[in-house]
Image (cartoon, helix red, strand yellow):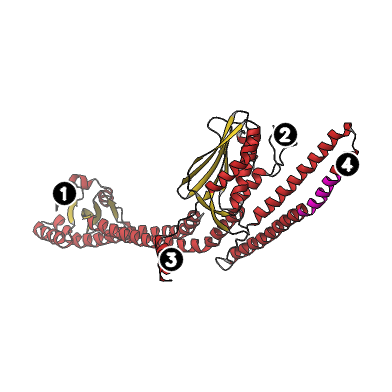
Amino acid sequence: MRRHLVAALVALPAAVVTVLGLPPVMQQGEEALRELAHTCVQQARKLSGTAAKVLAGNDRESLRAQIAEHQNRTGGRAHVFDARGRSVDGALCILSPAQVSQQDPVQAALRGQYTDSADQKSAQLADELVVAVPVIWHGLLIGVVVICSALDDLELQQMTIWVVVGVTAAFALALSRFLAELLARWILRPVRYIETAARRFAAGDHDVRVPVHLGPPDLRVLAETFNHVAEQVQQQVKLQRSFVSDASHQLRSPLVALRLRLENLEPHVTPEGERRLEQALGEADRMTGILNALLLLARAESGAQPAEAVDVRAVAEERVASWRVTAELRHVAVVIEGEVDVVVSAIAGTVDQILDVFLDNAVRASPQHTTIRVRLVEDDGVVSVQCQDAGPGMSPDERARACDRFWRGPNAITSEGSGLGLAIASSLAQANHGHLLLQEAPGGGLHAEVRLPALRPAQPTARLDGLSQRIRR
């Protein structure tokens, strides 16, 4: 956008320079050529008197002296022809005398086609300007005086003018380009702020705002509108999260009471109704799990909890040990691979919950006699916690929707899961300035991965300062 705006701002000065600069330069060249032709006509008229005497009598020495003096003074060359177009005397032009006599100005002068200086004929050849003036003696045409003037000086002068105009135009365009760049930056600075803020807002940073005192008035209004919309959306999101949290919390007590009442009904249920009672208790447990997941999701999206150092290896070993009992009942093994000393900056308890989601899905999806691998990898300041299973995996479309709330795969069992696990894991990853990634495992199955920022070690100088302070104490 900035390039288009700068191009539009520079196009107008360029058009002005072209329209107002080129015609005067071209007109100046034509004026210089006309002025040179007029000068040559005046010089030819001065020689016409002597030429008339030579053509009427026989005073060639005087004519040659004037032609030589004209050539020395002006650098031009003069030639005299009689009424029949035959060369009488003169300096050599680029063309031969026979060729000069065939030029249009000379032929016009030999025909006597003239009334005053405005009717004098001239011809611009490749390198010379040819001017012909008739010689009149007692009212009769007795010859023609021809002046040949080189155009080198005129071309050099014209080229100099073009160079000056070109340099001036280039400087003017460069200046306009510089000023257009400054103007474009001033105009587009609020747009860049709004673009950056919109991207951060879309990424979940609802506290971002843009300055409203930069740029043109119209863009300031746009910045104010963006801030107003951001505040409205932030308020609506807060209300939605509060509603989810409050509703989930308020529903827990009735569900607990409902489950207790269902359990109290067990002695009074006939053997035929025991199965239905178990189903009702299962549905109550499932609803309780959904409410707990909603509370966890609302807590994760609040983003108000501070980050701290988390030993990922210790967390992984603890969660794997806890899930290994459940996995062994399904004849599934769980192992840990990768880095030993891995520390991340994360909110307390979030890495545990993300691993629980991964392992829960992996245990339920893994066939018997397979292995779930939990791998810890640290690379370039990022720690990856990976969980790979040998289950059926997911298609690309399913992986794209797996983090949506309440979405469940087509093969999911109705009584298991709430469709919130991966959504919670993704929200927890974003709350820790990381992200969740789902891929196909190398040997089939699902590769679930969360990438979190590694905890930067303290600087050596800081550790030495603390050690020196302890020694002084």
Q: Is residue 229 above or below residue 380?
A: below
Main structural element of the magenta stretch: helix, strand or loop?
A: helix
Residue 406: give x, y in percent of width and height. Answer: 71, 43
Residue under label 2, please give it: 413
| Disc 2 to disc 4, C-alpha distance | 27 Å
Q: Residue at x 49, y 61 (%)?
A: 185
Q: Is residue 250 visible?
A: yes
Q: Secondary structure at mark 1?
A: strand
Residue 317: give x, y in percent of width and height. Answer: 56, 44
Residue 273: give x, y in percent of width and height. Answer: 88, 34
Q: Nearer the viewer, mark 1 or mark 4?
A: 4
Residue under label 4, please give it: 265
Q: Residue at x 52, y 46 (%)?
A: 313
* Residue 138 position by quadrant: bottom left
Q: Could you say which disc has been placed on residue 403 in the image?
A: none
Q: Nearer the viewer, mark 3 or mark 1?
A: 3
| Disc 1 to disc 4, C-alpha distance | 141 Å
Given contact means CB atoms under 8 Å apart, are the residues at marks 1 and 4 in contact?
A: no
Q: Going from the N terminus, do you reach mark 3 or mark 2 first? A: 2
Q: Going from the N terminus, do you reach mark 3 or mark 4 first? A: 4
Q: Amino acid at mark 2?
A: Ile
Q: Nearer the viewer, residue 36 or 224?
A: 224
Q: Amino acid at mark 1?
A: Ser
Q: Residue at x 62, y 54 (%)?
A: 204
Residue under label 3, please give it: 466
Range of residues picked out in magenta: 249-262
Viewed as shown, does residue 301 lie left or right of 25? right
